[in-house]
C-alpha cells in the first residue's frame, strides 16, 4: 500500500509540473494571473490531482487566438471594455511607428473611430479633434477612401451613441467633429427618450417648443416629420395624443392630416373646420383634410362614412375652387402603413460586403403629387363599395367637376383633343392646364367603372394596368378585383375589341388577388403573348391587403401568386415570413442559395443563408456552396464568400475557418495567388464573426498587420475591391453593436 501511495504521489508531482506550465501558458494568453496549486496541496495527494485535473482542463479547453474553437457562450474568450481600450491604444502606438504615410494615416483613422465608438470617455476629445484635422487635410487632396471611412465610421459611432443614450458623445460628435453648436443631435436623442418613456405631456411640450428654421412653415414641417418618426417606431398612440394636443391654429393643416392618418376622425374634422377660413400659400386645408379622411375611411371599407365626407366637401367648397391643382395625398404614410418597408435594405445591411461596397442610406424622396380633390373622393367611393348608389354619387362628382371646368374657362372637349395631340414635351408644357383637366376627368370616369358602371369604348381606352394596380393597392377592400376576375358579357366583349392584351392582364391580376390559381394559370398558358406582366405589381397589392388586416385574403392571394409565378422573390419571401409560412419560406430561401451570386457579388445567397440560419437551418458550407451545379471557380468562390458573409452575421467563426481549410472541392485547383486572395477575405470575415460574438481580441489578431489592400474584399479573378472593412474600426463597432462593450 505504501509503495502504491508513493507511486501515486510521484504521479501527482509530474501532473503538477505539467499543469503549472499549462496554467502559465493560459495566463499569458488571457492576460491574468493564475495561482499555482503545487505548493499548497502536497499534504493531500488526491486533492492535488483534482486541482491538476481542473488546470489541465483549462489548458486543453483554451484555444489559441486566431482559432475559432470556443463556443459563442464561452466567457473566457470574451474581450472586456478595458482590454478593448488597451488594444486600440496599442494600435495607435503602432501607427506612430509606421513609416508608410498612407498606412499610418489609415491606422490612426481606424483607431480614433474605434475610440469614439466605445462607451468610454478615454481620449474622446483627442479622437474627435484628430479626425477632424485629418479630414480637413484630405479635403485638399485627390479622392481618398479615408474621407469616406471617416464619414461612415462617424455615422456608425453616432448611431451607437444614440442606442445607449450617450448625450455627451452625441454632442461631442455634433460640436467637435461636425462643428455644430445648436445641439441637433442632443435634441433628437431627447425626443427618442421621451418616445421610449411614452410621456405624452412632455412630448407635447417638446413639440410646442420646436423652433422653425426659416419661417413657421419650416416649423410645421419639422413637427410633421417628428409625428412620422413616432409612427415609424410603432408609437402611434403617442403620436395621436401629441397631434391632438397641438392646437395652435397655424398647425391645423399639418396636424389635421396626421390625425386623419391616425384614425382620429373627430379631431381631424375639428382641424378641418378651423383651417377652412385660413389663407395659406396654397389654399385652405379644410377640404384636403376631409378628402384624406374619406381615403382612410374607404381603406377601412366604411362606405357610409365616405359618403358623409363627400357631401361635406361638396357643401364646403364652391365648384369653381375644385380645380385639378388642389390635391390631396392618397399614398400610404408612416402613420397608416404598419408593415416593415425597409426589410430588403435592413437585410442587406447585415452583410459585411454590402456595408463595405455601398452606402445603405435611403435618399429622401420627393413629395407625391397626389390627386385632385374630386378624383380622390370618387376613388374613395369606389374603393369602399360598388353598386348603383356608388355610381350615382360618382356621377354627381363628375357633374360638379364639369361645372368647375366651365367656370374656370376650360373646354373639356378641346382638352381631350389637345391631350391626344400632345406627343412632345413642349406640347405638354404649353397645354398643361388643359391636360390636367382632361386627365382628372379620365380618372373620374375610371372611378365610375371601379364602382360598377359598364365598360364602354371610352372607358376601355382609358383603362390601364398601372391604374388598376394603383387603385387596388390604395383601396385593398375594393370589389374591383372580383369584378375583373369574372369579366363576361358586354364588358369582356368591349375589352376584347379595344385591347385584348389589357383584358388578359387585368383578369390575371384579379384572379390571383381572388386566390384563383387554377384559372390564373390557365390564362397564362392560353394567352402567353397577351400576358406580359410585371409580377411585382401584384405583390404590392397583396402587401396592401396584409397591411389592411385582410390576412386570409392576402394568404390566398400569395398562394395563387406563387403558383402562377414560382421561383425566388424577395417581397414574396417577406410575406411568407409575415404570414408564418416558415416551411415555404425555407424552400424559397434554398432557391435563393442555389441561384447565382448576382451582379454585385453579394445578394441572394447571403440573404438566403442568413435567413435560413435564423430559421434554425445548419446546412454545412460545402453543401451550400455546391447547391448550384457546374459553376466555374470564380462563381464558386463568390458563392463561398457570400456563405461566409452570412456565417459572419451569425458569429460562426469556426465554420468559416473550417471552410478555408481545406477549400471546397470546387476550388481545390485554384492558383496559389487566387487561393491566397480568397483566404484573405475568409479570414477577414472570420475576424468579423469573432468580434460579433464577443471575441474582439481574437478577431483583431486575425487582421493585424494587414496592408491597405488586404483591408478590402478580394475576389478571385478580380483582386481587391470595395472599401476597407477588415480593420480595427469595423471590428470594434460590430463588437459594440452586439452589446459586448458593457463596462
Image (tube, rainbow, N blue to C red):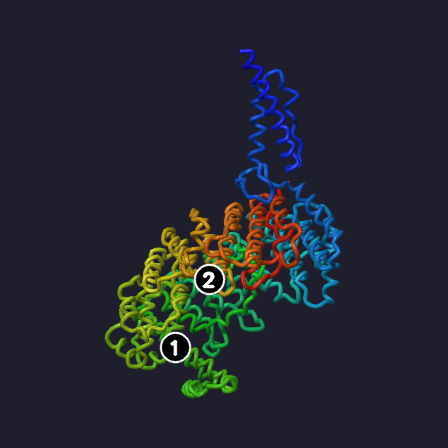
For marks 2 and 1, the one nearer the N-term is 1
Disc 2 on helix, strand or loop?
loop
For the residue pair 421 and 372, the one nearer the viewer reads as 421
- The residue sitting at 29% across, 66% down in the picture is 521
- The residue sitting at 27% across, 76% down in the picture is 491
The total of numbered circles placed on residues is 2
Task: Mark yes or no: residue 266 visible.
Answer: no
Q: Would you say 183 lies left or right of 565 here?
A: right
Q: Residue furthest left?
A: 489
- The residue sitting at 74% across, 54% down in the picture is 98
Residue, disc 1: 398
How far apart marks 2 and 1 lie (CA) works out to 63 Å
Residue 330: where, in percent of width, then height? Answer: 46, 67
Q: Would you say 353 lies left or right of 388 here?
A: right
Q: Nearer the viewer, mark 2 or mark 1?
A: 2
Residue 71: where, in percent of width, then height? Answer: 52, 40
Residue 87: where, in percent of width, then height? Answer: 68, 45
Residue 589: where, in percent of width, then height? Answer: 41, 55
Task: Mark yes or no: residue 552 visible.
Answer: yes
For the residue pair 304 and 344, the one nearer the viewer reads as 344
Q: Would you say 684 lies left or right of 121 here?
A: left
Residue, disc 2: 632
Mark 2, other Cα within 10 Å: few <14 / some 14–19 / many ≥20: few
Amino acid at each position: 500500500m505504501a509503495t502504491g501511495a508513493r507511486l501515486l504521489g510521484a504521479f501527482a508531482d509530474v501532473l503538477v509540473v505539467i499543469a503549472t506550465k499549462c496554467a502559465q501558458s493560459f495566463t499569458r494568453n488571457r492576460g491574468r494571473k493564475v495561482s499555482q496549486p503545487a505548493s499548497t496541496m502536497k499534504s493531500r495527494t488526491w486533492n492535488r490531482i483534482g486541482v491538476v485535473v481542473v488546470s489541465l482542463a483549462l489548458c486543453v479547453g483554451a484555444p489559441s487566438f486566431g482559432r475559432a474553437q470556443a463556443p459563442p457562450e464561452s466567457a473566457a474568450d470574451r474581450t472586456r471594455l478595458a482590454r478593448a481600450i488597451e488594444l486600440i491604444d496599442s494600435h495607435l502606438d503602432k501607427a506612430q511607428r509606421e513609416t508608410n504615410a498612407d498606412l499610418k494615416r489609415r491606422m490612426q483613422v481606424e483607431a480614433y473611430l474605434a475610440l469614439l465608438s466605445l462607451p468610454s470617455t478615454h481620449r474622446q476629445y483627442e479622437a474627435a479633434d484628430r479626425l477632424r484635422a485629418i479630414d480637413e487635410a484630405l479635403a485638399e487632396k485627390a479622392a481618398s477612401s479615408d474621407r469616406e471611412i471617416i464619414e461612415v465610421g462617424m455615422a456608425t459611432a453616432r448611431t451607437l451613441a444614440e442606442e445607449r443614450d450617450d448625450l455627451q458623445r452625441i454632442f461631442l460628435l455634433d460640436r467637435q467633429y461636425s462643428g455644430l453648436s445648436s445641439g441637433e443631435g442632443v435634441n433628437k436623442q431627447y425626443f427618442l427618450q421621451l418616445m421610449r418613456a411614452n410621456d405624452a405631456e412632455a412630448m407635447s411640450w417638446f413639440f410646442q417648443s420646436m423652433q422653425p428654421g426659416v419661417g413657421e412653415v419650416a416649423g410645421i414641417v419639422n413637427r410633421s416629420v417628428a409625428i412620422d418618426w413616432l409612427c415609424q417606431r410603432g408609437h402611434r398612440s403617442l403620436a395621436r395624443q401629441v397631434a391632438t394636443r397641438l392646437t395652435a391654429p397655424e398647425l391645423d393643416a399639418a396636424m389635421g392630416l396626421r390625425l386623419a392618418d391616425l384614425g382620429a376622425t373627430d379631431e381631424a374634422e375639428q382641424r378641418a373646420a378651423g383651417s377652412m377660413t385660413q389663407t395659406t400659400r396654397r389654399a385652405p386645408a379644410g377640404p384636403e383634410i376631409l378628402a384624406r379622411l374619406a381615403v382612410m375611411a374607404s381603406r377601412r371599407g366604411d362606405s357610409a362614412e365616405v359618403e358623409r365626407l363627400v357631401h361635406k366637401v361638396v357643401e364646403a367648397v364652391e365648384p369653381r375652387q375644385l380645380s385639378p391643382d388642389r390635391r390631396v395625398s392618397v399614398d400610404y404614410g408612416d402613420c397608416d402603413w404598419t408593415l416593415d418597408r425597409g426589410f430588403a435594405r435592413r437585410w442587406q445591411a447585415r452583410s459585411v460586403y454590402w456595408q463595405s461596397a455601398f452606402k445603405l442610406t435611403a435618399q429622401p424622396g420627393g413629395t407625391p403629387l397626389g390627386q385632385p380633390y374630386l378624383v380622390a373622393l370618387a376613388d374613395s367611393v369606389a374603393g369602399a363599395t360598388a353598386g348603383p348608389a356608388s355610381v350615382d354619387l360618382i356621377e354627381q362628382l363628375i357633374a360638379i367637376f364639369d361645372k368647375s371646368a366651365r367656370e374656370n374657362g376650360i373646354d373639356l372637349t378641346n382638352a381631350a383633343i389637345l391631350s391626344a395631340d400632345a406627343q412632345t414635351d413642349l406640347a405638354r408644357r404649353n397645354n398643361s392646364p388643359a391636360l390636367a383637366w382632361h386627365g382628372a376627368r379620365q380618372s373620374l370616369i375610371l372611378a365610375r367603372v371601379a364602382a360598377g358602371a359598364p365598360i364602354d369604348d371610352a372607358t376601355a381606352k382609358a383603362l390601364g394596368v398601372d391604374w388598376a394596380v394603383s387603385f387596388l393597392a390604395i383601396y385593398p377592400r375594393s370589389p374591383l378585383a372580383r369584378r375583373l376576375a369574372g369579366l363576361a358579357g358586354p364588358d369582356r366583349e368591349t375589352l376584347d375589341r379595344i385591347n385584348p392584351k389589357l383584358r388578359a392582364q387585368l383578369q390575371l391580376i384579379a384572379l390571383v388577388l381572388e386566390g384563383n390559381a387554377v384559372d390564373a394559370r390557365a390564362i397564362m398558358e392560353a394567352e402567353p403573348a397577351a400576358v406580359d406582366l410585371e409580377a411585382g405589381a401584384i405583390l404590392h397589392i397583396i402587401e396592401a391587403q396584409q397591411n389592411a388586416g385582410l390576412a386570409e385574403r392576402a394568404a390566398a392571394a400569395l398562394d395563387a401568386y406563387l403558383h402562377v409565378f414560382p421561383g425566388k422573390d424577395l417581397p414574396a419571401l417577406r410575406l411568407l415570413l409575415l404570414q408564418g409560412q416558415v416551411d415555404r419560406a425555407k424552400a424559397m430561401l434554398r432557391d435563393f442559395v442555389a441561384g447565382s451570386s448576382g451582379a454585385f457579388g453579394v445578394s441572394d445567397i447571403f440573404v438566403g443563408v442568413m435567413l435560413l440560419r435564423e430559421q434554425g437551418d445548419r446546412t454545412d458550407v460545402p453543401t451550400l456552396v455546391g447547391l448550384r451545379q457546374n459553376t466555374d471557380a470564380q462563381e464558386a468562390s463568390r458563392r463561398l464568400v457570400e456563405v461566409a458573409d452570412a456565417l459572419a452575421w451569425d458569429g460562426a467563426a469556426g465554420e468559416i475557418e473550417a471552410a478555408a481549410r481545406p477549400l471546397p472541392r470546387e476550388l481545390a485547383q485554384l492558383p496559389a495567388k487566387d487561393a491566397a486572395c480568397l483566404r484573405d477575405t475568409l479570414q477577414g470575415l472570420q475576424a468579423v464573426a469573432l468580434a460579433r460574438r464577443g471575441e474582439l481580441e481574437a478577431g483583431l489578431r486575425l487582421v493585424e498587420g494587414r496592408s491597405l489592400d488586404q483591408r478590402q474584399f478580394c475576389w478571385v479573378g478580380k483582386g481587391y475591391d470595395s472599401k476597407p472593412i477588415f480593420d480595427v474600426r469595423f471590428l470594434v463597432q460590430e463588437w459594440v453593436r452586439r452589446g459586448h462593450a458593457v463596462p
